[in-house]
Each structure stands twice: as structure tokens, then as C-alpha cells.
Image (tube, helix red, strand yellow):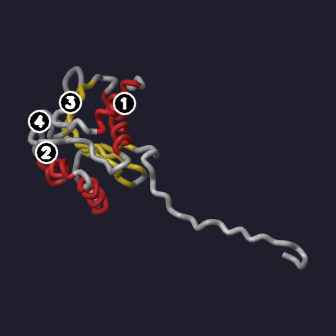
Amino acid sequence: MTHGQAGALALAPPSRTVAPSAGSALTVEVRTTLLFTPDEQVAIERMLSARPELAVFLSLQWLTGFFDDPPPGADPGLVIFRQGHLIRGMVPIAVFKTFTHARIGLLGGSYGSDRVDLVAPRGFEAAAADAFIAWLASAYGPDGFLFELRDVPSTSPLWGAIHRAREEGRL
């Protein structure tokens, strides 16, 4: 600025980090092992601590038994939902392949767990359930699939995701 010129000073508000919202797209990752980094284990334990009614049946320790000795004919998997590198949900599955279609159930349902469900942090339940149903339809839809929901609570976000997918013609 030179002498005689007016100047203005604009102060920008301090930048702040905005936490990712449930509205951001989630990616789907399917694991056939339960090997996680320490940070991922902490994220999973935090999700489970918010759902004590499911925590024991979805803990990595409990699921290890099903991965080591799955139900007859089942291929176990853990579907992880991520937002960037952050884990935003998970659901253990058992895939039973037949000649004509696949049967997909939640791992543990009717095979030793009292309750099974998709688990996600508060605010991410619907997004994770919608991503799961979309993944099921794309991964198994062309050949046909049956989705079994045994021992899934009536409050599960999966029920709403199935309803939304049917209403929107995605299933």
C-alpha cells in the first residue's frame, strides 16, 4: 500500500476440520481374514461398544471361531464399509454357493449367535446398510441370490435398506 491509499484487512475465520458425514459415499471391501491394523481394531471396538447387545457376537474374537470353522458349505467373509480410510461399518456374512444361485446370510445367524446385524457408528447405519444391499445386488444379482436374515433384530438398518431398494427398483 502506498501513502494516501485506503486498505482493507479481511480476516478469514480459522479453518476447521469437518468430520466426514454419513452423506459421503461409502466403499465396500470384502475380507476373508480378520487381520486388522491396531487402528482398525480400535475403530471396530468403538463401533461395537456402542451396540452392547451385539458386541459379543460381532467381536473379532467371536468371529474368529466362525472363520476358522465355518458352518458346513459356507464361505465366511467380513464386509467392511469405508469412508476414505476410516471404517464406517461392518457385517459378517456366510456365502453358500449352489449351482443356480447363492445364499447369503449373516455369519452366526442360526449357527451359534443369538443376534447378528450390520454395525456402524451412529449416523452411518442407513448409509452402510444401503451400501451393503447395493453390493449384494451387484455381486450376486446377475446369477440370483437369496438373502437370509436369521436372528437379525427388528431394529436392524438392513430392513430399511431392503425396503428402500425395493421401492426404488434396485432389487
Comes first in the chain, label 4 or label 2: 2
Disc 1: which residue: 138
Image height check: is 170 above or below 62?
Answer: above
Dot 3 falls on a residue whose secondary structure is strand
Query: Residue 170: x percent and y percent?
Result: 39, 26
Residue 77 visible: no
**Residue 110 circle label:** 4
Residue tagged 2 = 66
Q: Secondary structure at mark 4?
A: loop
Q: Give amino acid for label 1.
A: Ser
Q: Name the secondary structure under disc 1.
A: helix
> Which residue is the extreme one toward the top?
100
- What is the distance, in whole Å, between disc 4 and disc 2 at their CAs? 12 Å
Check disc 3 and give the amino acid type: Glu
Q: CA distance from mark 1 to mark 4?
A: 26 Å
Q: Residue at label 3?
A: 148
The C terminus: image quadrant: top left
Q: Is residue 141 left or right of residue 56?
A: right
Q: CA distance from mark 3 to mark 1?
A: 17 Å
Q: CA distance from mark 1 to mark 2?
A: 25 Å
